[in-house]
């Protein structure tokens, strides 16, 4: 049995997310099809982040285990997989990995970046959320900084029976806002993320930026004290602006997978 660590990027616009589903086109499904065709053997696959429908990735990490007699170099695997994958999915790197490497369980943190555009854009509309109202970036930045630390994100999670056992307590290592001309980038790094958590956080930040919600409401929400007059679910930001940017692992050691950094979203 051979184990590989894959790093890949993808445009999630035309897919029903990363995770395989019946009767749906997914990133993982396309990757499995390509890998099994290449190795002529069943493939055991898993990803570091279960990105939702329409969400993109700049550096998704996956493990691939195959029982195959084919002796292919990592560089050859990259070429062969990319020849078999659709144009909107690209394998960036393949490395030999320890047999027990697990892309999701071994990950320490994941970083997502969300792109908000302050103007209508003809070329990158698939990768941003165009917010027509004026946004107070300073207020949004102040709110983003309050996200750092250990919090109860129950108010920001979506109901998912498959993730019912997942703890709503999330440790946010970093949360920051960057303004680049007419583009606002929100970046958040955490131990894990609840279903739709990032998009709902972005939705609230935008409401704070437009003055519709007072920043003083945020501490209660971060302690799991939801308010009936704040319909956070209805404010879920579009999937188009969200990217899985980076997954970090422990410090490199001989033969162990490394973390990969990719800092520039599309656009």
Image (cartoon, rainbow, N blue to C red):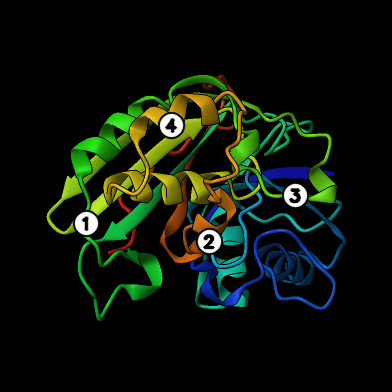
- Identify the residue shown where x is 59% and y is 32%: 257
3 vs 1, front mark: 3
Instruction: Specify the label residue 159 is tagged with.
Output: 3
Q: Secondary structure at mark 4?
A: helix
Q: Distance between the Cα atoms at labels 2 and 3?
A: 18 Å
Q: Judge from the rendering whether residue 246 lies leftward or rightward of residue 100; answer left or right.
A: left
Give the mark nearest the N terminus, 1 or 2: 2
Q: Are marks 2 and 3 in contact (CB under 8 Å)?
A: no
- Identify the residue shown where x is 50% and y is 73%: 88
Crowding at dot 4, Cα within 10 Å, few <14 / some 14-19 / many 20+, comes out as some
Give the mark nearest the N terminus, 4 or 1: 1
3 vs 4, front mark: 4
Give the mark nearest the N terminus, 3 or 1: 3
Q: Distance between the Cα atoms at labels 1 and 2?
A: 18 Å
Q: Distance between the Cα atoms at labels 4 and 2?
A: 28 Å
Residue under label 1: 183
Q: Distance between the Cα atoms at labels 4 and 1?
A: 26 Å
Residue under label 4: 217
Give the mark nearest the N terminus, 2 or 3: 2
4 vs 1, front mark: 4
Q: Judge from the rendering whether residue 223 lies leftward or rightward of residue 125; answer left or right.
A: right
């Amino acid at each position: 049995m051979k184990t590989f660590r894959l790093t890949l990027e993808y445009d999630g616009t035309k897919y029903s997310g990363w995770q395989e589903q019946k009767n749906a086109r997914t990133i993982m499904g396309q990757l499995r099809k390509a890998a099994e065709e290449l190795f002529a053997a069943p493939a055991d696959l898993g990803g570091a982040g279960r990105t939702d429908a329409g969400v993109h990735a700049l550096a998704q990490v996956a493990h691939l285990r195959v029982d195959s007699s084919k002796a292919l170099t990592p560089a050859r695997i990259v070429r062969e997989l990319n020849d078999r994958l659709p144009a909107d999915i690209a394998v960036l790197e393949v490395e030999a990995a320890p047999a027990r490497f697990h892309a999701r369980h071994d990950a320490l943190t994941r970083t997502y970046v969300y792109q908000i555009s302050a103007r209508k854009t003809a070329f990158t509309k698939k990768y941003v959320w165009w917010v027509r109202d004026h946004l107070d970036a300073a207020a949004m930045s102040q709110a983003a900084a309050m996200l750092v630390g250990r919090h109860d994100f129950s108010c920001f999670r979506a109901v998912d029976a498959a993730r019912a056992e997942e703890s709503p307590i999330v440790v946010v290592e970093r949360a920051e806002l960057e303004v680049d001309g007419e583009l606002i980038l929100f970046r958040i790094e955490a131990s894990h993320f609840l279903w739709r958590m990032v998009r709902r956080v972005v939705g609230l930040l935008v409401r704070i930026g437009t003055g519709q919600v007072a920043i003083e409401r945020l501490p209660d929400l971060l302690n799991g004290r939801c308010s009936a007059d704040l319909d956070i679910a209805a404010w879920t930001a579009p999937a188009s602006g969200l990217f899985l940017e980076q997954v970090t692992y422990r410090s490199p050691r001989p033969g162990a997978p490394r973390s990969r950094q990719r800092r520039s979203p599309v656009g």
